[in-house]
Image (cartoon, rainbow, N blue to C red):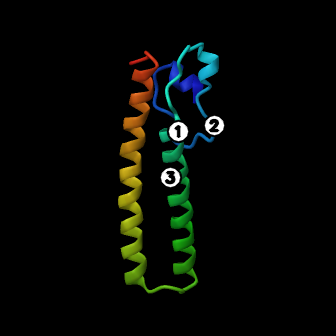
Amino acid sequence: PTLSFLLGGDMPEHAEGRVLWEALALSNPPNTQPYAQLLAARESLLGEFRALKSEYANQAIQPEEFEARQMELRRLAEQNTLKTREESKRLRYASGRDF
């Protein structure tokens, strides 16, 4: 994520790391906790979706329930994606690297 940040790109979607603010020599690095929470929420949603697909494959839930839960998880994932993009922009702006 650090290199992507320096080059002005978006944070990598599947990044497991963090921006190494200390390597950027910022005297007052921005609060990255909200961004980290959004990444954790994304991972949680992915886990829920995998579990849902497994339940459906094992015929543990009916198609209607599967579709309803799938739509809800997609809605939550879309919200998370938008918030993550906004937070990424905030971090770039807060660090003085508004590309």
- Viewer-side residue, 24 vs 59: 24
Mark number, residue 97: none
**Cα gap from disc 1 to disc 3, whole angstroms:** 14 Å
| Badge 2 or badge 3: first in the primary sequence | 2
Tell me the quarter of the picture where residue 90 sits.
Answer: top left
Tell me the quarter of the picture where residue 26 sits.
Answer: top right
Q: Name the residue beneath numbered marker 3.
A: 42
Q: Name the residue beneath numbered marker 2.
A: 17
Q: Are marks 2 and 3 in contact (CB under 8 Å)?
A: no
Q: Is residue 6 visible?
A: yes
Label 3 crowd (10 A; few <14 / some 14-19 / many >=20): many
Label 1 crowd (10 A; few <14 / some 14-19 / many >=20): few
Instruction: Indicate whether 74 appears above or below 85.
Output: below
Q: Name the residue beneath numbered marker 1.
A: 33
Q: Amino acid at mark 2?
A: Gly
**Cα gap from disc 2 to disc 3, whole angstroms:** 14 Å
